[in-house]
Amino acid sequence: MSTLAAPAGPTTLQEEKAPMAAVEVLRTGMGTTVQDAGRYGHAHLGIGRSGAADAASYALANRLVANPVGAAALEVVLGGLRLRARGAVTVAVTGAPCPVAIDGRGAATDTVLHLPDGAELDLGTPATGLRSYVAVRGGIDVAPVLGSRSTDTLAGLGPPAPRPGTVLPVGPAPRAFPAADWAAHPPVGAAEMDLRVVLGPRADWFTDDAVAVLLGSAYEVTPRSDRVGARLAGPALARREHGELPSEGMVPGSLQIPPEGEPVLFLTDHPVTGGYPVIAVVVAADVARAAQARPGTRLRFHL
Amino acid sequence: MRVLNCADWGVLVEVGGLDEALALQAALEERRPDGVTDIVPAARTVLLRVEPGRTDPAAVARAVRGLRPRPGRRADAGELEVPVHYDGADLADIAAHLGMSQREVVAAHTAATWTVAFCGFAPGFGYMVSDDPRFHLPRRSEARTRVPTGAVALAGEFTGVYPRSSPGGWQLLGRTDLVVWDTDRDPPALLRPGVRVRFREAP
C-alpha cells in the first residue's frame, strides 16, 4: 500500500511501493556497510573493485527480492543490525545464517520477508559464517560514487558506513516479482574450509618446501581480518628470492606473503597494487566462501 | 615478457623494466584483449583482469603474447599543465642531493616532460617519470604523518602529486592548487597513465 500519492500516472500494481520508501538504521552491530557488485574499470587510477565480500550470498539476496543484478544491499558483520521500515518494504537475509526477527517474531533467512511500515527487522549473531546480506526490494538507493554504491573501506570511497539514525532510501521496485520464496545453497561458513588455489604469480620467489608447506598445512584466520583481507596464522613460508619486489597489480584471492608476519588472503577491498610476493591465488568462487571465514576458521589450500 | 598466473582473475604480464612496461601499456591500449575489465600498469608489470567464469585468462595470455610492443612507444592520454608553488619543505635538501641550486631544481623540473607511468599508493596518485635522468632521489628517512593535498613531491625517479592528505615519505618540492582528484568528476583523476605533464611555476 502506498503511503504517498504517486506522481502522474496510475499505480498499476499494489507491489509498486511509494517512491520514498526507506529503511532507518537503529543499530549497526560490529560493522554494516552498503555494498553492490563493485566499482569497475577504474583500477588503472588506483581504485579497487570493492563490492560485496561474499558475492554469491549477495547475489542470492538480490535474486530473492527480484532486484536487478548489482542492486545495492547491506553487508552485516556478525549480525547485530536493526532496521525500521519506512513504508512497506520487502527484504531477504542471506549469507551467514543469523537469527532473524520481525517485531520480535522469528523469521527465516534465505527467504522473502515483508515488512509493513514501521516494522523492525533484527539480525542476531550468526552461528557460523561472518557476513550476512540484507537486500531490500528496489535496492539501497544512496548516491553512487564512481558508478558504485560500495563502500571501499581501504580507499575511503563510496557511501559512509550507516550509523544509528541513518535513513537509507530504497529505490523503486523492479518490474520483476520474486519467483522463489526460498533458495537452497551450500552451507555458509565452517570451522575448516578447503580452498582451491592456482600457484603464482610469484610462487618462484619461494622455496619448493614453502609451496609444499602451504599446500599441506592449515592456516587460521586471525581477528586482525577485515574486508581488505583475512590475516592468517600458520607455518612460515621460506623465500628463495630476497630482493624487493616492485609494487604490482593484485587480485582478490591473492595470498600475499610479507617477509615477516602474517600471510594475507586478499578480499574485496584489497590494495590495487602491493609490494610483497603472492605465492598463490584462490579461485573466484572460493574467495566468496573465504569471505565467510570468521576468526578461528582453519583454511586449507589445494591445487 | 612473462605471463604469470592469477587463477581465474586474470594474468600478470612481467617485462624487463619501466620502459618496456610503458611500451606494453601502449600496445595494450591499441589492441585491448577481449574480456579485459581492468588494466593495472606498474613499474615492471601490467595486470589484466577479467570477469571470472566469463573470460578465460588463457585466451588473454595468448592475445598478450601476440602483441609486439614497440620500444620507446608511450600511451598517449593527453596533456596537462600543473602550476606549482615551488616552496616545499624539502626543496633545500632536494637541491643539495641533486647538486643544484634551488632555482636550478625548479628550472629542471619545469623544463622536463613528465609522463604518468602508473597509479598506486592511493586513488589518483600518479607516478610520473621524466626525460631528465638527473631526477633520482631517495625517500625521506622518516615519513611524514601528514602530507597535505596537492603536495608535489619526488622519490626515486618519480614525481607525484598527493591527491588527498595522507601520510607520505616523498620529498616535498612544492604544492599545486590544481585539484588532481575529484570523485564527482569523470574521470576522477587528472593524472592517468599516459598523461603527459608539464609543470610550470605558479605566479
Image: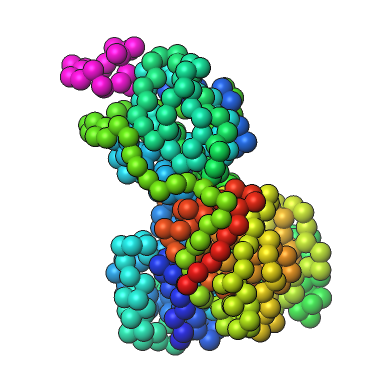
Provide residue A188's location: percent of width, then percent of height: 47, 46
Is residue A282 rendered to the left or right of residue A31?
left
Image-based side of A187 in relation to B158, left or right: left
Residue A296 to residue A239: above or below: above
**Residue nearer the viewer, A265 or B154:** A265
Residue B177 picture location, percent across and down:
61, 51
Q: Residue at x 53, y 44 (%)?
A: A129
Tally of numbered tags: 0
Residue at 60% x, 53% y is: A297
x%, y% of residue A72? 41, 38
**Image position of A149 with respect to B111: above or below:** above
Q: Is residue B149 visible?
A: no
Q: Which residues are magenta?
A: A1-20
The N terminus of chain A lies in quadrant: top left
Residue A77 in view here: yes
Quarter location, residue A69: top left
Q: Is residue A62 above or below residue A253?
A: above
Instruction: Please give the name of the residue rendered at 53% of the width and 50% of the height, measured from the top-left corner.
Output: A190
Compared with residue B5, is residue B164 higher up or lower down, i.e. above or below? Answer: above
Classified by dominant secondary structure, the portion drawn in magenta counts as loop
Residue at position x 46%, y 22% from top?
A: A106
Which color scheme does this rendered protein use? Answer: rainbow
Does residue A139 show up magenta in the picture?
no
Front residue of A18/A191: it is A191
**Percent position of residue B80, x then y:** 49, 63
Q: Does the segment drawn in magenta span residue A2?
A: yes
Left or right: residue B177 versus residue A168 is right
